[in-house]
Amino acid sequence: MRILSIETSCDETAVSIVDAVGVFPEATYSVLGNALLSQIDIHREYGGVFPNLAKREHARTLVPMLTQALTEAKLLTEAPRSLSQQEVEELHELLHREHGMADEMITFLETYENPKIDAIAVTSGPGLEPTLWVGINFAKALARTWNIPIVPVNHMEGHVLASVFTGYNLHTVALPALALLISGGHTELVLMKDWWTYELVGQTRDDAVGEAFDKVARLLGLPYPGGPEISKLAEDARTRELPQFADLPRPMLSSGDHDFSFSGLKTAVRYAIQEKELSNDERAALARDFEDAATEVLLAKTAAAFETTGAQSLILGGGVTANRHIRSSFTEHFATEYPDAAVYLPESGLSTDNSIMIALAGHAHIDNALDPLSASSLINADGNRSITAK
Ligand code: KG4
Ligand code: ZN
């Protein structure tokens, strides 16, 4: 089973081709092609992701990314042909909102033979609806012309699978597993009782932790996205053992439930800075103090949820798991407190958004694939799609 996967939920345009042999979750996978383009440089000057700009960029880059991934997979053969008038009209209709994409897609389809792909997996949510729609319409157009089915994928489930992927197969996860999903839009604790059966245990009441990293970075005058910038400064402060700059709160630490709140922490950082011009050392120390506070809350609340749910293993997923301090704090704490429990973290390159994880989740739900005609009306972008929804 060869899957073409597409991810456009935020500011990464990603297309992969993954070969799956066997049945989920015992299958083995080979990544045949993987093309990923980050729009960070485009959004940086605005200090955040601008949905309509992101949408236009996805529309501009999807066909080139598809070409790149298929070339890497050695699946492209030139075979010039003409699409029928009806096919051309359908493509224009499907892609009429995606600026310039229909003509590019038609040129692509008229240049190459249909590649040997069995199904398309596409992120349908959660994420930014305008950008999700570009990926979905692109998937529908390809599926229609190649006459293959489409599986709509939940982006957060993709993050879960990215964390348990070895690069070749999936770890044998002891269930129930507790998943802490931390990204730019989400901070949630989810109990995975079985594959596909998720129960929401706790979530943020305001900002997501990645959002807090990004906002604090802006307060410190660092470029977007702030997570990696804060993490670099904080690491420097740790190496040089800089003294504490601010005594920051640990919000919701003893709230008695499994929810989070990060907006107060961000406000505390703003108060700590006030109108001062911080020295480089002070900025680094404050970045470290913030990272310490955020990590401590995430870890303590996750450990508490691990106890109450009786989980057997821990999965950490989402872009914020690229943070080295968070990774090591969790692995060290769990190795000491729960030596029998496995802690799964994404391998390098799979923490932040990518399409390999979308192929894995697509394979997991291949039974729900829709034929290209029903996909047209049944697959929609859902910006708030929950991982717990069926
Ligand atoms: O999962 P992701 O790529 O996109 C969403 O689905 O939101 O996560 C992006 C988030 C951003 O907020 C970014 O600042 C954060 O992950 N991030 C990090 C690090 N790398 C990315 N946060 C902390 N430390 C990092 N090293
Ligand atoms: Zn994500």
Image (spheres, grey):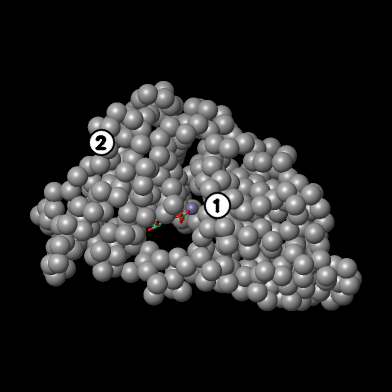
Question: At 81% across and 74% down in the image, what residue appears?
Answer: 110
Report whether 285 appears left or right of 9.
left
- Residue 207: percent from left, percent from top: 36, 50
- Residue 173: percent from left, percent from top: 51, 32
Question: At 20% across and 52% down in the image, what residue appears?
Answer: 268
Regarding residue 328, the answer to whether it shows in the image is: no
Question: At 66% across and 66% down in the image, what residue appears?
Answer: 66
Regarding residue 15, the answer to whether it shows in the image is: yes
Determine which of the numbered discs, if any, sits on residue 106 in the image. none
Report whether 320 appears left or right of 369.
left
Query: Is the residue marked 1 within 8 Å of ligand 1, measured from its CB?
Result: no
At label 1, the amino acid type is: Gly
Q: Which residue is mark 2?
A: 253
Seen from the viewer's position, the closer of residues 241 and 193 is 193
Q: Which residue is mark 1?
A: 383
**For ligand 1, which image quadrant applies?**
bottom left
- Residue 159: percent from left, percent from top: 51, 47
Q: Is residue 254 above or below residue 324?
A: above
Tell me the SS state at disc 1: loop
Question: At 32% across and 43% down in the image, what residue appears?
Answer: 261
Spatial CA span between label 2 and label 1 = 29 Å
Figure quadrant of residue 133: bottom right
Q: Quadrant of the C terminus?
A: top right
At label 2, the amino acid type is: Leu
